Image (cartoon, grey):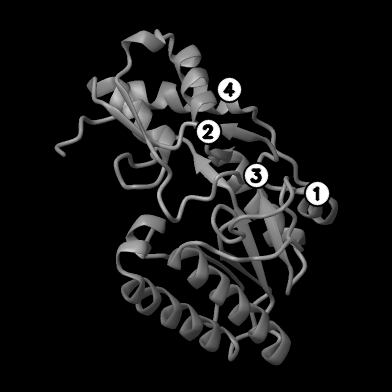
């Protein structure tokens, strides 16, 4: 580890639903390992550490949209609470031990190779369901999320690695809110699928589902000159082309 000068930590064991089902496991499996990592890094000379947090559930219900990094954080899921806790530890290790940690708050990422049916990732699950002629279950027709294509997210992380300021947190998203209904309509357009041929079950939002969330990303743009390059439709098209060629039918 002495030869490593940059660290990007994406490791996590849970998603919002699984954290809600077992909050103690969410806490114990995620927070201690990351704090241990920060502790080890405090004894090393590293140039930059990128800690992947979340912009999707970190803020909870807010009074204004899009959401800025300075807005209040009141997560509605244990997943959001542990992510916020890790951000606080990141700042502590930056202030007390000069570990150059930058926290990244991504919105809802989608793209090639995303695994469907994992309780996270509407677009991957919807595309797999189309290919398998399966029912699509959606929690909240009017729930609004910020979707970012994976290439844009990766480029944002690289920008933060190059130019991000240690001790800061950065939103990375499209800055545009899309309702679940809009996502399905756009997906039908991109895949040339008549909406009438889909079997969709809309259920009420779950207790941990924030009703509207999309991010203000002007801070990372100002600090690193990063901006998303792909529109939602372009990202969907790229993702769909990959799924058509490479998706292997689920055994679930």
State the residue lying farthest toward the left.
Answer: 251
In the image, which is nearer the foreground, mark 1 or mark 2? 2
Asked whether, in this view, residue 180 is left or right of residue 90, the answer is: left
Q: Position of residue 200 (x, y in %)?
A: 33, 24
Q: Position of residue 155 (x, y in %)?
A: 64, 46
* Residue 4 visible in the shown view: no
Please give the name of the residue rendered at 53% of the width and 88% of the height, measured from the top-left corner.
39
Q: Are marks 1 and 4 in contact (CB under 8 Å)?
A: no
Identify the element where label 1 is drawn. helix
Quote the CA–CA distance across marks 1 and 3: 13 Å
Quote the CA–CA distance across marks 1 and 4: 22 Å
Identify the element where label 2 is drawn. loop
Identify the element where label 3 is drawn. loop
Quarter of the view holding residue 92: bottom right
Instruction: Pick whichever, 129 or 21, lies toward us.
Output: 21
Using the image, tell me which numbered label, if any, was put on residue 214.
3
From the image, tell me which residue sits under label 2.
142
Using the image, tell me which numbered label, if any, was put on residue 218.
1
Please give the name of the residue rendered at 74% of the width and 69% of the height, measured from the top-left corner.
168
In the image, which is nearer the foreground, mark 3 or mark 4? 3
From the image, tell me which residue sits under label 4.
233
Question: Crowdedness of circle 2 by 10 Å Cα count: few (<14), some, many (20+)?
Answer: some
State the residue lying farthest toward the front.
Answer: 204
Please give the name of the residue rendered at 71% of the width and 51% of the height, measured from the top-left corner.
67
Question: Crowdedness of circle 4 by 10 Å Cα count: few (<14), some, many (20+)?
Answer: some
Of the two numbered discs 1 and 2 on the same chain, state the one appearing first in sequence.
Answer: 2
Please give the name of the residue rendered at 65% of the width and 27% of the height, measured from the top-left corner.
231
In the image, which is nearer the foreground, mark 4 or mark 2? 2
């Amino acid at each position: 580890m002495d030869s490593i000068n940059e660290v990007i930590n994406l490791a996590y064991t849970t998603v919002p639903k699984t954290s809600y089902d077992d909050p103690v496991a969410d806490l114990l499996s995620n927070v201690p390992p990351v704090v241990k990592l920060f502790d080890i890094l405090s004894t090393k000379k590293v140039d930059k550490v990128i800690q992947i947090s979340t912009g999707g559930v970190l803020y909870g219900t807010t009074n204004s949209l899009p959401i800025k990094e300075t807005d209040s954080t009141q997560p509605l899921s244990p997943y959001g609470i542990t992510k916020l806790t890790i951000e606080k530890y990141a700042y502590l290790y930056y202030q007390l031990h000069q570990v150059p940690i930058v926290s990244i708050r991504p919105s809802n990422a989608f793209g090639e190779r995303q695994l469907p049916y994992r309780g996270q990732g509407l677009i991957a699950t919807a595309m797999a369901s189309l290919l398998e002629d399966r029912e699509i279950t959606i929690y909240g027709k009017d729930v609004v999320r910020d979707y970012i294509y994976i290439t844009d997210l990766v480029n944002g992380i690289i920008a933060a690695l190059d130019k991000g300021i240690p001790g800061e947190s950065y939103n990375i998203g499209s800055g545009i809110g899309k309702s679940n209904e809009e996502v399905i309509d756009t997906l039908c357009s991109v895949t040339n699928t008549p909406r009438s041929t889909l079997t969709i079950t809309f259920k009420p939002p779950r207790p941990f589902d924030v009703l509207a969330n999309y991010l203000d990303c002007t801070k990372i743009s100002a600090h690193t000159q990063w901006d998303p390059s792909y529109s939602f439709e372009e990202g969907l098209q790229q993702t769909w082309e990959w799924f058509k060629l490479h998706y292997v039918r689920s055994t679930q």
